[in-house]
Amino acid sequence: MTNTALITGASSGIGREFAKYHAHLGGDVIIVARRKDALQALKSELETEFGISATVIAQDVGNPDGAQALYKTIKKSGLKVDVLINNAGFGGHGNFLERDLNDDLAMIDLNVSALVTLCHLVGNDMVAKGSGRILNVGSTAGMMPGPLQATYFATKAFVNSFSQAIDHEMRPHGVTCTVLAPGYVKTEFAATANLEGTGLVKQRGKTAAETAKIGYDAMMRGKLHIVNETMLSFVTNWIIPMMPRRMILKSIAGMQKK
């Protein structure tokens, strides 16, 4: 029986740690990102250390038809996906009206459209065989509005809602979908999103390896939603929903000011 995980955004950060953790457990991986050199280095590391098979696909799934092109490549290769981890995504700091609209539309393409596409295509294959696990990487950002990262927070709110809904639909067919909602994690994300110098990145948070393990283990248990820190889970699930909306907006904006 195969145990192959398809992981997007696998060249660094949490995605890289997902690949390492799955390989550590003896599973093969299909690792996807734009940076082929980084993927090749990871492939060599995983195959040498864990004796598994790693397939590299250099693909920007955020491009128009990028996710469909990835799926076609996988099908042509004869590979079967048992675990889908939609990890690829990015954010961007600044007032919405002052940001380049194309940057935010590209964010929606990657964070939302690519994820939906892969869930639909791979999810259908999983339902057809009666088994499968999907892990969508959301964020605690998806559990509140986000001034100065309005589009990013909104995309993660979509991931949160969408993932739970499709889990309910697919679960009777042997397929589950879990949302991992991390707080701040020290990866390339902050630099790419221009968040350095904000209060958000001063938080200690969990490491990428810790976060990947928490999310992966929750997926394998069939959990619906998991936050990677106990106290943060309490705050986002029980405190923030009770706060006045304007207070939440002011607090989040303050955390993201430079």
Image (cartoon, rainbow, N blue to C red):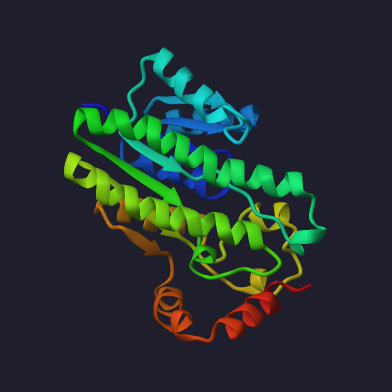
Residue in the foreground of this view, choosing between 227 and 187 = 227
Residue in the foreground of this view, choosing between 73 and 68 = 68
Quadrant placement of the N terminus? top left
Q: Is the residue 147 above or below the residue 171 in the image?
A: below
Work out whether residue 27 can be spotted: no
Give the quarter of the image for residue 92: bottom right
Image label count:
0
Q: Residue furthest right?
A: 98
Residue in the foreground of this view, choosing between 227 and 18 = 227
Residue 233 located left or right of residue 98: left
Where in the figure is residue 215, as x and y percent of width and height? 38, 55
Q: Residue at x 63, y 76 (%)?
A: 252
Q: Is the residue 142 above or below the residue 137 in the image?
A: below
Work out whether residue 147 can be spotted: yes
Give the quarter of the image for residue 227: bottom left
Where in the figure is residue 57, as x and y percent of width and height? 53, 24
Where in the figure is residue 122, as x and y percent of width and height? 36, 31
Residue 245 located left or right of residue 198: left
Q: Residue at x 79, y 50 (%)?
A: 100
Where in the figure is residue 226, as x and y percent of width and height? 37, 62
Quadrant placement of the C terminus? bottom right
Q: Is the residue 203 above or below the residue 191 in the image?
A: below
Residue in the foreground of this view, choosing between 42 and 95 = 95
Q: Residue at x 43, y 78 (%)?
A: 231
Q: Residue at x 57, y 65 (%)?
A: 184
Q: Is the residue 140 above or below the residue 176 in the image?
A: below
